[in-house]
Amino acid sequence: MNEVLPVIEVRDLHKSFDGVEVLKGIDFDVNRGQIISIIGSSGSGKSTLLRCINWLEEPDSGSIRIVGDRVGIRADGKTPMSEKELASVRARAAMVFQSFNLWPHLSVLHNVTEAPVHVQGVNKDEAIAQAEVWLERVGMLVKKDAYPWTLSGGQKQRVAIARALAMNPEVILFDEPTSALDPELVGEVQGVIGELAADNFTMVIVTHEMDFARTISNEVVFIDKGVVVEQAAPEKFFGDPDTERLRQFVSRYR
Amino acid sequence: MDWNAWITLFEGAWVTLWISGISIALGIVAGFGVAVLRNARIPVISKFLYYYISIIRATPMVTLVLFLFVTAPYLPIDIDRWIIAVAALTINTTAFNAEIWRSALATFSREQVEAAKAAGMTRRVMLRRIMLPQMMITSLPGLVNEMTLLIKSSPAIAMVGLADLTRITNRITAVTYEPLPPILAAAALYILMIGALVRLQRVADKYARRLAM
Amino acid sequence: MNLQDWLTVWINIDRVALGFGVTVLFFAFATVTAFIGGCILVYLMEGRPSFLKTSLRSGLDVLRTLPFLIVLYLLYYGLPQVGIRLNAWTAGMIALSLYHASYYAEILRGARVALPQGQIESAKAHGFTSFRMYYRILLPQMVLRSGPLFGNQLVGCLKDTAFLSIITIFELTAAANDLQAVYFIPMPAFIVVIALYWCISLVVEQALRSMGRYAKHRGLSYE
């Protein structure tokens, strides 16, 4: 693997829904080991950007690369990827959803082993051993035989994080991971993400929590009305923003 | 198929329609009676009705029709074959309708019952004036669905020698030696009849949901 | 109806057992093939609507508005006209499987529509292709959620097997009719046979109840 290539490289990304342009030419890089938070008001396009990265939404134009490989379009630049190709690219960027989206018919352990065994073809025993390691890390190993409906929101999200980690992705995409949680459960999930940050996992986090973004990220990106308005290290981003728009946005959250 | 064949086919359709129609009407009323009776929790009767519903639910229409047909001659009176057909269909559909009515009774709003009692209504008046009109609407989708099931199992009445819409195709074939056209034509008539009921069910569903609001 | 009549049934119990076996065989075979068929049909209708998918759906809608017997007639009496001659058993098996597959497809489609979109997105994000996603993630949930509807369908299928007696298959109802015609014992013969149908339905219900408990344990309790 080439260390020089960015893990994610987004170029001139455009996306419209029903004639309304949500992304208006986004350029955006994530390097190995970086933790990038994306901030913006609701409707700014930040979630759409994240969902375009693993092709859950199909962008209208522009390109996305994960460690140099195009997502969604074949190397020739025009043919859409087959479903199989798309699936294997997607697996390199794991995603943690706002609403957890655990698979309710599978136990905690099998939620984590499902994709490694049935998508990546990992040997079952090996996958279970790995899953137990990840579950231990997020503090959910004791619940490995429980079913999702018995878990609290915070526990579900920790399992979802273990499930994402189990795919050995290049990057983990977090789509507002704490927005659906009761306030008292936000801390445990942020704590787990913080530990991963300390271990230099590459992560992109769409969030509303300013304090969380400030403490966890190397860089913070501000998206407004479909464009990247500002991108900077947290101290500068929150302390001395360049643009008036960001200044206003940040001041609202003080 | 010539004109005569079509007329024969329509005769078959008519047999299916009127035998089913009478059974549906009887079955809806009888089903309501069974549901109310079961709800009253009278020891022996309640148990009996429970087994009646459970057994009839599992008895094929063909078997039921045949059963009545072969045991009828042992009764002291002469019974017409159409009565046997209607009886079999009615016994069957009553069991299913009773379950539909019973669930409407069970889920009926307690608040409304209390309001009716507070207004000084007797049980009979409450049942007739408050519960039944609403239950008719909430049960209608289920009842119409049961009508389609009844018509789909009605070809069983051919076992008593009645030439319904399905059996009549054999008679037409016996003349024309071409089985496919009458069977397809009969299928088309079933699609018309049951399709109309399915449409009615959708409308009923909409009304029932409006009431639930 | 006296003891002698009941003894006659007992002496001829092998006839009843044969009919019972044939009924169970048709019922079991059709249940398995119709269920698998239903699963496949719903998979074929997955994804963006196309002309083929819409026609498939209308075809299934039409099939469900027909009585089972007319489908059986079509296969057994109708097809020979175009040179396809099926024996009674083959026609019976095909008709029963095909007809009930259209109902299973409808039940599963209903459950499919009710599945939350997030389930599908998280499966995609974890690299599942559509076929794998369907049978690993979606189908198990669709099946567990449809429990009570399967109950009605299974009993419906059991009851439709009795129509097979009309095309000369010696199943349970034919056995009862056979006994009563030979020995003039309509009451005992039919009571035994109806009791047997009832027993099968009780077994089916018990099986579905355990499935319901299992689904509940997995948090997929159905309303």
Image (cartoon, coloured by chain):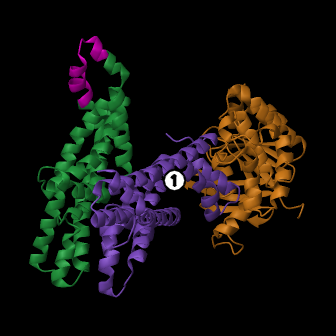
Chain colours: A orange, B green, C purple
Which residue is found at the position 39% from the left and 80% from the top?
Answer: C87
Q: Which residue is mark 1?
A: C112
Q: Position of residue C109 (x, y in %)?
A: 47, 56
Compared to residue A75, the image places residue C154 above or below, namely above
Q: Position of residue B17 (x, y in %)?
A: 17, 57
Whether residue B136 is visible, yes or no, is: no
Indicate the quadrant containing the C terminus of chain A: top left, top right, bottom left or bottom right: top right
Q: Is residue A202 magenta?
A: no
- Rendered image quadrant of residue B81: bottom left
Provide the secondary structure element on which disc 1 rests: helix
Residue B201 or residue A179, whichever sits in front: B201
Which residue is found at the position 27% from the left and 39% from the top?
Answer: B31
Which residue is found at the position 32% from the left and 26% from the top?
Answer: B40
Q: Amino acid at mark 1?
A: Arg
Task: Locate residue B173 relative to residue A46 in the image: left or right.
Answer: left
Indicate the quadrant containing the N terminus of chain A: top left, top right, bottom left or bottom right: bottom right
Q: Is residue B129 magenta?
A: yes
For mark 1, does the 10 Å Cα neighbourhood hold few (<14), some (14 to 19), or many (20 or more) residues?
many
Task: Locate residue A25 relative to residue A8 in the image: left or right.
Answer: left
Q: Position of residue C95 (x, y in %)?
A: 39, 70
Q: Residue furthest bottom?
A: C83
Residue A49 or residue A175, whichever sits in front: A175
The secondary structure that most of the magenta stretch takes on is helix
| Magenta part of the chain | B115-132
